[in-house]
Amino acid sequence: MRSVVVADLSVATSSGVGADVAPAPGPVRAVLPGTVDVAIVGAGCSGLAAAVRLAEAEAAADVDAGVDAARTPSVLVLEGRSTPDPRSWCAWDDGSDPLAEARSASWDRWDVRTDRGTSTGSDPAHPYVLVRAADRRSAADRRISAGRRDTGGTVHIVDGAAVSAIVRTDDGCVVTSRLGTVRARQVLDARGPRCPDHVGAGRVLLHQRFVGQWVTADRPVFDTSTVTLMDFTGQDSAGPVRFVYVLPVSPTEALVESTLFTQDAADPFDHEAHVAGYVGRRWGLGPDEWRVVDEERGCIPMTDAPAQPDVRWSAAAAVVGTTRPSSGYGFARSNRHSAVVAQHLAAGTAVPPFVDGWRTRFLDAVFLRFLRDRPEQAAEAFRRLFALPGPLVVRFLSERSGPIDELRIVLALQKRPFLAALVRTVRDTVVRTRSRS
């Protein structure tokens, strides 16, 4: 059940003695159920994916096996926001999204720009897709509402229900939210990755800090055929890795995002000025020819340390490990993992973390050390990576690559700095192993 806002409602009697106009009531406060089987904290990417998969699993069971709807697990999604989510997610489409109809835009072509040249790529079988959170939420609401009409499903989403505490009990958990308390047999923390303050010795932690501004221009300047994944042009090579990311959704509208990979979580870099300078430099737009209509900002951890849930809420299972350490991409990985999450929630069993294979973990660890130790060479590394055939790059970035693919990528990159990063990775691994023994 979602909170409902009633607005512009008045009741008037005929004029005369005692005539009155009733004032419009305020927002109707959602009433939480006393008990549910599953409580999901967060209606973002992971939370909605798990909820939709649970709803559709219920529908399939009811239709195919004649299961009594009363026996299917009841699911409550507690979303802290009471206003639309400004975030967006992107990934190369691998067919894993349970809400594929929610995509906001897609592109078959992308580029990476540096002062030494531009690399372009394409993989029509796996386009690069944009999903805005508001569109995904609307699609989830439609799916869940349809399930309730067809099968009496028991998945509900409540907004404005920020969770403040989760306490384990003998038979589950008690979840305290802004709208009240609910008991749940299982609780899933699906609020996404949070940047840790520090990691252990021999580990790498970079903070991927970004500010994305949705820009509207007064004249058509954006090329909607191509996504700019990274633009390093015209930037000082000293200091942390920084670049601009562009998603052109129409000739006059684009997401222009300033991104920084930094070891300092409090780095004072001026992202807004970075975007403004880029808009003027690349498209020749004067300050009065464009405006910012929406904004999103955040921090994504890039670390080879094992993913950990929020220690404050140890009573809850958590969606962890779905963000790719070397890139910050997590949307497709989260969608794939949501099938496993939903299966375990429905069965009442422990939700496993998302775990990469050893090759992926090792390659990511090497790349993170390269980014930390040689940030001035990052632009050239990305240019060389994306100069390779598009399908090869997409296989690698979506964890579908084989040893031959990975060897081709390694041979395309700068040899000396990556060899140094490899040696550092091995040394750090040996030190950690010895410290544990």
Image: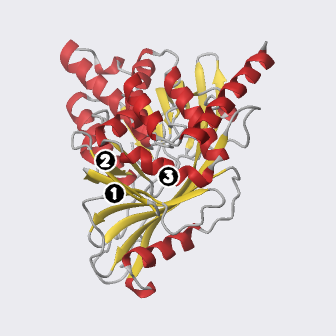
Marks 3, 1: nearer the viewer: 3
| Residue topped by disc 1 | 227
User: Which quadrant of the figure contains the C terminus?
Assistant: top right
Residue at x 45%, y 58% (from the top left corner) = 86
| Residue topped by disc 2 | 128
**Circle 3: is it few (<14), some (14-19), or many (20+) Cα within 10 Å?**
some
Q: Earlier in the sequence, mark 1 or mark 2?
A: 2
Q: Secondary structure at mark 1?
A: strand
Q: CA distance from mark 3 to mark 1?
A: 19 Å
Q: Is residue 74 above or below residue 101?
A: above
| Residue topped by disc 3 | 380
**Circle 1: is it few (<14), some (14-19), or many (20+) Cα within 10 Å?**
many
Residue 429 visible (yes or no)? yes
Q: CA distance from mark 2 to mark 3?
A: 22 Å
Left or right of residue 41: residue 207: right
**Circle 2: is it few (<14), some (14-19), or many (20+) Cα within 10 Å?**
many
Residue at x 32%, y 63% (from the top left corner) = 248
User: Which quadrant of the figure contains the N terminus?
Assistant: top left
Report the amino acid beneath label 3: Glu
Which of the two residues, 185 or 250, is positioned nearer the viewer here? Answer: 250
Coloring scheme used: secondary structure
Q: Position of residue 402 (x, y in %)?
A: 38, 24
Q: Position of residue 394 (x, y in %)?
A: 34, 38
Which of the two residues, 177 or 247, is positioned nearer the viewer here? Answer: 247
Q: Secondary structure at mark 2?
A: strand
Residue at x 72%, y 36% (from the top left corner) = 199
Q: Earlier in the sequence, mark 2 or mark 3?
A: 2
The residue furthest front is 416
Q: Earlier in the sequence, mark 3 or mark 1?
A: 1
Q: Position of residue 209 (x, y in %)?
A: 58, 54
**Contact? badges 1 and 2 (CB < 8 Å):** yes
Q: Is residue 172 above or below residue 105?
A: above
